[in-house]
């Protein structure tokens, strides 16, 4: 929905604007594009007074233009976003008011061409919000977020525009369009309908009211969680409080204490990155319990930041909105255009995995209990013991030390590794592009070309290091989508992560998990780079939410191929490839603790879905969660990965509401798809790779995902491979070694 709305900005006078911009550039006169198409008086006054807003200019330079990251001023975001929105609304108005009979060309294609200025502004704004954030950016964010949301509503509620889209959708001429054009038309139509375009005026008004109320409640929910994460922490005062903690955790706790003004102490913050490592290593069971309780009760403390009432309100409004739109429940509305299509199918998959995962948890607990008993701990394993004893079992059973593995995983060598894999699978070649402006000196850019034809394919930006103002985690971002409706437009994609920069001149060593993430994000990048479609709305990664993680999770499999390990996982001092014995230990440990990982995740996904299937009843979140988990047979030793009062995916926005199952759904495809290589000539089987490119990586959203998968695999996905990968069937022995 969101992606399409962002694309559905029309500009009938696009060519005129580009010509104007060129003319003004030639005469060195600053110009605000949108002003120039509104009124003559506005144009002349703005030209006299406004300084150049680089954000509103066409991207210049090589490769069809690149983002002008070297000339951005934060103060220019607000006027640029305003101008972009105004221009886009004017474009939409022109399309809606066209007196010619609606056709695919004069309606859908024009919508696809529209909104380019706003797209460019939002791209750079997005990069600043996620990687260059600070007080100045936050002020803009607070003001512009609700306005950007209201702007989207204005477009979907444009009745004349929808009438034209509907006419194209219902026209007999549609049958003559290409399959991509037909799917694009369907996407526009269905997304407008799903956003309420067909409702009567009173219903539309109510819908709009609900959306605004929900936006307020999402903000409130998020701020409550943030307040508890910021406001609560555990102070460790003595050496005894630090028992078991490795130096890296002590250092982080000391740094956290400094920001909380707790001098001479150590602080465990109320966030996952702080609490999880503490639960893994702290020998102090009393403090583990304290930290665990603090973390799992965020938003659930019966105080001014308690989220239970907010959740009830959100669920009520979502249920009302679903009914207004003609759906049984919010879950049915959300899943309609996902690959799963119905909540029932998503539930079926989750429950299929649930039972063996729970059985595995009971085994894991038995193993941990045995170890605790052997140590004479005299305890019964509780949730605050799980990570601690799991780590002990891992070391004892697999003899696996993360620090030993790390010595073979150099960031830059692995980057060469992903380039090599892209060359083998997709015939891509990467060369440094030093003539491109970047947002920060740490960012580097590569040009991607076809190895055989030498043709330009796109650009890949790499922003690997953590810095102040950069959001945590790792992600891919498309700065420009591949398309052919505005000429031959090539894509610009980026990978972002948060490695702590090494000492100058020394190679940066990363963990196996981080290396896996690097392959994952590069998988998203390759999904964008392989795109070969006509229309921007269906380009690259603009696919269903429960399908988008499939290409990225798939790429993770290539890290552990012998070809990659032997060439690129080489010791940072000796240059020798990682020994087979160590690789074997990593592989053997791969199904370890999968009971915990799966149940922790699935319990949250199941509660999410059940909450949104519950319909109209008034819901007490705490009671509902408790009853649902009891009914499912949730093991006592585990808590949901995100308990309801802090479930940001689900209540911080509509984002993953009734959609947390998506990660599992995508993983079924991932594991089953890799099987096609295994059944063939291996991970570098050219024929299978070509099918992968043709049916999965290049088609964007031009094909129904289930159909695309069938074309690639020759059948529907099966869950057996997933169960095996997680160690739930077939290789119990291996998992127990
Ligand atoms: Zn991903």
Image (spheres, rainbow, N blue to C red):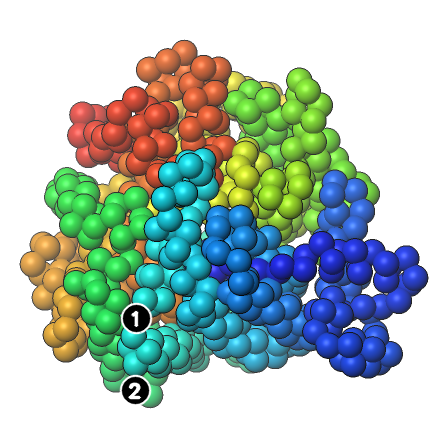
Task: Please report the residue visible at 32 percent of the width from the left and 33 percent of the height from the top.
Answer: 707
Residue 560 in view of the camera? no
Task: Please report the residue visible at 86 percent of the width from the left and 58 percent of the height from the top.
Answer: 23
Under tag 1, what secondary structure?
loop
- Check disc 2 and report the residue beneath it: 303
Give 38 or 151, whichever is nearer the viewer.
38
| Residue found at the very far top of the displayed protein | 681
Closer to viewer: mark 1 or mark 2: 1
Residue 594 in view of the camera? yes
Give 309 or 622, whichever is nearer the viewer.
309
Tell me if residue 594 comes above or below residue 232 in the rendering: above
Do labels 1 and 2 touch, CB within 8 Å? no
Task: Please report the residue visible at 60 percent of the width from the left and 69 percent of the height from the top.
Answer: 90
Q: Earlier in the sequence, mark 1 or mark 2?
A: 1
How many marks on residues?
2
- Check disc 1 and report the residue beneath it: 199
Tell me which corner region of the image, top left, top right, bottom left or bottom right, holds residue 269: bottom left
Tell me if residue 722 comes above or below residue 183 in the rendering: above
Circle 1 packing at 10 Å, graded few (<14), some (14-19), many (20+), is some
Distance from Cα at disc 1 to Cα at disc 2: 40 Å
x and y, in percent, of residue 505 in the image: 75, 41
State the quadrant of the C terminus. top left
x and y, in percent, of residue 680 in the image: 37, 13
x and y, in percent, of residue 230 in the image: 46, 76
């Amino acid at each position: 929905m969101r992606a399409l709305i962002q694309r559905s900005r029309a500009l009938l006078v696009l060519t005129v604007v580009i010509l104007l911009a060129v003319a003004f550039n030639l005469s060195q006169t600053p110009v605000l594009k949108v002003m120039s198409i509104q009124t003559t008086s506005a144009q002349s006054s703005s030209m006299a007074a406004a300084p150049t807003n680089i954000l509103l200019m066409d991207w210049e330079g090589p490769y069809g233009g690149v983002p002008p990251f070297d000339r951005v001023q934060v103060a220019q975001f607000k006027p640029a976003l305003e101008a972009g929105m105004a221009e886009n609304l004017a474009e939409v108005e022109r399309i809606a008011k066209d007196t010619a009979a609606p056709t695919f060309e004069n309606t859908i294609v024009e919508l696809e061409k529209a909104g380019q200025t706003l797209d460019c502004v939002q791209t750079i704004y997005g990069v600043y919000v996620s990687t260059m954030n600070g007080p100045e950016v936050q002020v803009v964010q607070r003001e512009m977020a609700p306005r950007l949301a209201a702007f989207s509503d204005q477009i979907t509620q444009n009745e004349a525009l929808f009438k034209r889209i509907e006419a194209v959708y219902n026209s007999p001429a549609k049958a003559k369009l290409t399959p991509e054009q037909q799917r694009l038309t369907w996407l526009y139509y269905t997304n407008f309908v799903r956003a309420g375009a067909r409702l009567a005026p009173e219903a539309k008004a109510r819908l709009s009211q609900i959306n605004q109320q929900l936006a307020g409640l999402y903000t409130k929910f998020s701020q409550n969680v943030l307040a508890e994460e910021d406001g609560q922490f555990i102070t460790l005062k003595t050496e005894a409080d630090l028992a078991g903690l490795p130096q890296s955790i002590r250092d982080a706790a000391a740094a956290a204490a400094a920001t909380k003004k707790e001098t001479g102490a150590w602080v465990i913050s109320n966030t996952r990155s702080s609490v999880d490592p503490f639960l893994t290593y702290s020998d102090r069971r009393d403090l583990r319990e304290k930290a665990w309780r603090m973390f799992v009760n965020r938003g659930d403390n019966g105080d001014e930041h308690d989220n239970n009432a907010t959740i009830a309100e959100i669920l009520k409004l979502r249920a009302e909105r679903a009914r207004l739109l003609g759906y049984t429940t919010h879950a049915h509305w959300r899943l309609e255009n996902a690959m799963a299509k119905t909540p029932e199918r998503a539930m079926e998959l989750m429950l299929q995995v649930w039972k063996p995962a729970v059985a595995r948890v009971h085994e894991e607990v038995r193993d941990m209990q045995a170890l605790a008993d052997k140590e004479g701990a005299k305890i019964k394993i509780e949730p605050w013991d799980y990570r601690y004893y799991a780590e002990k079992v891992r070391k004892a059973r697999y003899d696996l030390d993360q620090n030993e593995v790390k010595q073979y995983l150099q960031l830059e060598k692995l980057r060469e590794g992903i380039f090599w894999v892209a060359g083998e699978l997709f015939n891509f070649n990467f060369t440094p592009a030093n003539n491109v402006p970047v947002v920060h000196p740490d960012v580097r850019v590569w040009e991607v070309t076809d190895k055989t034809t030498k043709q330009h394919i796109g650009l890949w930006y790499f922003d690997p290091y953590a810095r102040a103002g950069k959001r945590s985690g790792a992600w891919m971002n498309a700065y420009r989508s591949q398309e052919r409706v505005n000429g031959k437009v090539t894509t610009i994609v980026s990978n972002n992560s948060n490695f702590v920069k090494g000492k100058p001149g020394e190679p940066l060593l990363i963990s196996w998990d981080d290396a896996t993430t690097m392959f994952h994000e590069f998988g998203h990048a390759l999904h964008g780079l392989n795109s070969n479609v006509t229309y921007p709305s269906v380009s690259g990664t603009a696919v269903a939410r429960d399908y988008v993680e499939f290409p990225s999770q798939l790429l993770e499999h290539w890290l552990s191929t012998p070809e990659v390990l032997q060439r690129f996982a080489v010791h940072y001092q000796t240059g020798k490839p990682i020994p087979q014995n160590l690789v074997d230990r990593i592989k053997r440990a791969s199904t370890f603790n999968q009971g915990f990982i799966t149940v922790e995740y699935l319990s949250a996904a199941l509660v999410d879905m059940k909450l949104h299937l519950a319909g109209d009843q008034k819901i007490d979140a705490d009671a509902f969660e408790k009853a649902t988990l009891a009914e499912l047979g949730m093991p006592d030793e585990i808590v949901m990965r995100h308990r309801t009062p802090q479930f940001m995916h689900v209540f911080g926005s509509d984002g993953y509401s009734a959609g947390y199952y998506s990660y599992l759904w995508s993983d079924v495809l991932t594991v089953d798809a890799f099987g096609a290589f295994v059944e063939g000539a291996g991970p570098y089987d050219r024929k299978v790779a070509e099918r992968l490119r043709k049916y999965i990586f290049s088609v964007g959203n031009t094909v129904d995902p289930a159909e695309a998968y069938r074309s690639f695999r020759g059948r529907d996905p099966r869950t057996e491979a997933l169960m095996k990968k997680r160690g739930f069937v077939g290789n119990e022995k291996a998992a127990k070694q």
